[in-house]
Amino acid sequence: MNELDQFVEQELLPAYNRGTRRGPHRHYETLVQHAQRLRRRGRKEEARALYRLARTLPSQDMADPTYRRLHYVRYADDWLLGFAGPKAEAAEIKVRLEEFLRDHLKLELSSEKTLITHASDKAARFLGYEISSMHADDKRDQRDRRSVNGHVMLKVPWDVIRSMCSRYERRGKPDSRTQFIDDDDFSIIGRFGAELRGYVNYYLLAHNVGKLYRLKWTMETSMLKTLANKHKSTVTKMARKYRTRVATPAGELRCFQAVFEREAGKETPGLAQFGGFAIRRRKDAVLVDQRPPIRTRKARSCCSTIRVEVHHLRKMADLNRHKRKQVPTWFRLMAARKRKTLIACRACHEAIHAGRPTKQALSA
């Protein structure tokens, strides 16, 4: 795709970028000047009426032929072009892209996915976001000027929220995730908390990121049902056991925490947390992709905290070839999670290959 980047940067951008600023809207300028004259003469009510009328018009000439802007962004094979200009020129840009991809890269542009949409009428989809432009004449700044018109707005699509919620639901309601029942409470809460933070951090730039509270409720209920299913208890008892409140920059918030006490004299206790942060938009949000610290302990890494190894399968179909009457723990875990890797100590790893029972429960 480097050839596409060079084509856009060297040919399209210079050809479709001109002018420094749009010219003023003539009717808008006329109304504002008339209102200023009335205000100087003391006719304030008439001036206010003209100001209100002027706010219904754009302050700049949106069809200014001397002004064009073209912006380009690409992530892997997904790309987006933002163009300020007439639709005829946007269609011309699309044709030039089709010809370049067909003649130089031997690729065909998908007519279903490559669409020309007006940002004020319909949102464009890019990397899981809905991108459109804002318009609100009643949103004004300290200088009493309209402050949001024409600005780019990012939103979380509702169908994306429903899709994320469906991973934790069954028949339209939150349900337990049985593949994690063999994990300890610390791992279950930590897994749900990490997944929630991942979803929220990705959509922190969205103006409607607060819609993810629906996802948080679904995940919270699924987590509590998973714990209740594991301990043969109720959701209320599990919530009462792990619910707590933490101090955050947004104030004191509710969350669920599980503490793992390490051996005396070693590291500080481990803490798994679900929630405990406000789901609010951040204009300067940056996705920080850090590898979580690896912790080893007896309950998680089989029967030893040293010489931890990973058992691999060639393909998932190998799990269906198990002919034993008694299904071992390691097989049940891998089959439930649909994973080809399993963490075990050296002794248990050798037992798996030899067909002998492992000493303790394993963790995938």
Image (spheres, helix red, strand yellow):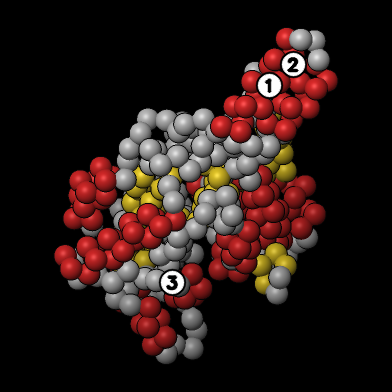
Front position in the image: 266 or 309: 309
What kind of residue is marked 1? Answer: His
Residue 218 pos. (x, y %): 68, 58
Residue 331 visible somewhere in the drawing: yes
Percent of width and height locating residue 274: 62, 46
Mark 3: amino acid = Glu
Q: Is residue 299 above or below residue 317?
A: above
Q: Residue furthest left?
A: 104
Residue 34 circle label: 1
The residue under label 2 is 38
For label 1, the SS is: helix
Image position of 282 with respect to 301: above or below = above
The reply to whether residue 226 is visible in this rendering is no
Dot 3 crowding, Cα within 10 Å, few <14, some 14–19, many 20+: few
Q: Quadrant of the N terminus?
A: bottom left
Count of numbered circles on the image: 3
Q: Is residue 235 left or right of residue 301?
A: right
What residue is shown at x 42% (from left), y 85% (from top)?
A: 320
Q: Which residue is mark 3?
A: 112
Rounded to the nearest angstrom, the CA distance separating label 3 from label 2 is: 54 Å
What residue is rendered at 60% in x and 42% in y? 134
* SS label for mark 2: helix
Q: Nearer the viewer, residue 316 or 128?
A: 128
